[in-house]
Image (spheres, rainbow, N blue to C red):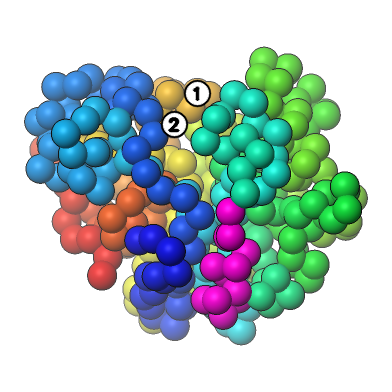
Amino acid sequence: MTGDRVQSFLIGDVEVLRIVEWQGPYVPAAELVPECGPEVWEAHAAQLVPDHREAGGDRAVVTLQTWVLRSGGRTVLVDTGVGNGRERPGSPLFHRRQGDFLGRLERAGVRPADVDVVVNTHLHADHVGWNTVDAGGAWVPSFPGARYLLPAADDHHFGPAGGYAGGTRPVDRLVYEDSVAPVHRAGQAVVWEDAHRIDEHLVLEAAPGHTPGSAVLRVESRGERAVFVGDLLHSPVQILRPECSSCFCLDPQRAARTRQRVLQRAADERALVVPAHFGGAGAVQVRAAAHGFSLHRWAA
């Protein structure tokens, strides 16, 4: 999935588009999901290579992407990637990045003015970057007519009220100030907790662990279901071994419990699981298995 090729599918009456910002080999697989050692990745190589682990190497393959949902006459973006021109000194791939994400979005038929709702499943740097653009030296919302739905626990934790995550990572202050605070100043932020219904088909639910406010977006239309899980999953290996959290999870044990709960419901309801960073088809149905879950059917 590169360039302007756009994957699309339907969940009942809800249209889903996939806009890729960047994809490729990222970090060693066993570093991304440290509780799954090299032997686990090797055991499942046939299911992971090449879309989720590079062929002939040991790095995990990840994708930065935004999912666009057209529901009930509204255009909804789920997560907004890294963005351009950000100071991210600890992330060489994304530091002062320049890409054509907004151009790809527009060529897929979505202009900034068309966006009604932006969902940030959580407030990590690679999920909020295109919340804003640089307008002559000031960060302003990229989508001038949109409501930005921010999970309250993350807004507190990563914002000034929480000391920018307690100052443990200097990047958290940079991310909040260039990608979240401008949305507040513009009066476009909607801070929610526990659950938030967007329309008759879309509802946000708290799914903490990866971050304090991590959320999933549930979609249901005409008997079909999907769940957009953000960073609850970084790799399919975590479906096969749901007890394994990523190196980016702030509370790995809680994340594992949440992952088990969300995947179990998805298996029970035959819901399509749509993570933030999967390559390949990007979304998959799961089934319960003896240990964890199985990869049942990938999206078209």
Dot 1: element: loop
* Residue density around tag 2, few if under 14, some if 14–19, many if 20 or more, within 10 Å: many
- List x then y, in percent, for residue 191: 75, 50
What amino acid is found at the position of numbered circle 2 in the picture?
A: Ala
Residue 140 is left or right of residue 158, and the answer is right
**Residue drawn at point x = 59 percent, y = 24 percent:** 90
* Residue density around tag 1, few if under 14, some if 14–19, many if 20 or more, within 10 Å: some
Residue at mark 2? 255
Q: Are marks 1 and 2 in contact (CB under 8 Å)?
A: yes
> Looking at the rendered structure, which numbered label has been put on residue 104?
none
Dot 2: element: helix
- List x then y, in percent, for residue 9: 36, 75
User: Quadrant of the rendered structure where residue 298 is?
Assistant: bottom left
- List x then y, in percent, for residue 81: 57, 49
- List x then y, in percent, for residue 66: 52, 58
Q: Nearer the viewer, residue 289 or 185?
A: 185
Residue 189 visible somewhere in the drawing: no
**Residue drawn at point x = 39 percent, y = 34 percent:** 26
Q: CA distance from mark 1 to mark 2?
A: 6 Å
What amino acid is found at the position of numbered circle 1 in the picture?
A: Asp
Q: Nearer the viewer, residue 1 or 13?
A: 1
Residue at mark 1? 251
In the figure, 64 relative to 54: above or below? below
Which portion, as a residue range, is magenta? 99-110
Image quarter where the N terminus lies is bottom left
Residue 107: say if magenta: yes
Image quarter where the C terminus lies is bottom left
User: Quadrant of the rendered structure where residue 180 is?
Assistant: top right
**Residue drawn at point x = 57 percent, y = 38 percent:** 94
